[in-house]
Amino acid sequence: MQHIFLADDMNTPRDEIDELFERLQPIKPPPSLIQRILTSVSRLPRPTPPSEPWDEENILDNLVIRKDKLPPS
């Protein structure tokens, strides 16, 4: 059985919820559902590459509103 741990799962004691979730049997979706999902995802528009190269300076610069024309305070 595969377990998924969140960051704080390692430091918290086990409780009834943990025991209940461990009793659940994993389910496998029917192949038709998997195919429907894959078909739907394939119809989604593809992401377009950014017009400018992505680097840390461009990303941060787009988040900052610059007011370079103001007199110094």
Image (tube, grey):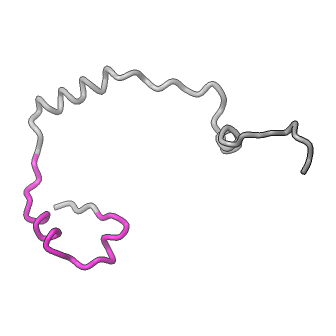
Q: Find residue 10 and report its image quarter.
A: bottom left
Q: Which residue is rendered at x = 55% and y = 26% of the image?
A: 49
Q: Which residue is rendered at x = 10% and y = 66% of the image?
A: 20
Q: Find residue 31 and report its image quarter.
A: top left
Q: Is residue 13 above or below residue 52?
A: below
Q: Is residue 46 left or right of residue 69?
A: left
Q: Is residue 72 left or right of residue 13?
A: right
Number of marks: 0
Which of the pair 59/3 is nearer the observer?
A: 59
Q: Position of residue 60 (x, y in %)?
A: 67, 44
User: Which portion, as a residue range, is magenta?
Assistant: 5-27
Residue 8 falls within the magenta-colored stretch: yes
Q: Which residue is rendered at x = 31% and y = 23% of the image?
A: 42
Q: Is residue 12 left or right of residue 34?
A: right
What quarter of the picture does the N terminus occupy?
bottom left
Q: Is residue 57 above or below residue 3?
A: above
Residue 42 falls within the magenta-colored stretch: no
Q: Which residue is rendered at x = 18% and y = 28% of the image?
A: 35
Which of the pair 72/39 is nearer the observer?
A: 72
Q: Find residue 52 and report its image quarter.
A: top right
Q: Is residue 48 left or right of residue 16?
A: right
Which of the pair 39/70 is nearer the observer?
A: 70
Q: Position of residue 61 (x, y in %)?
A: 71, 41
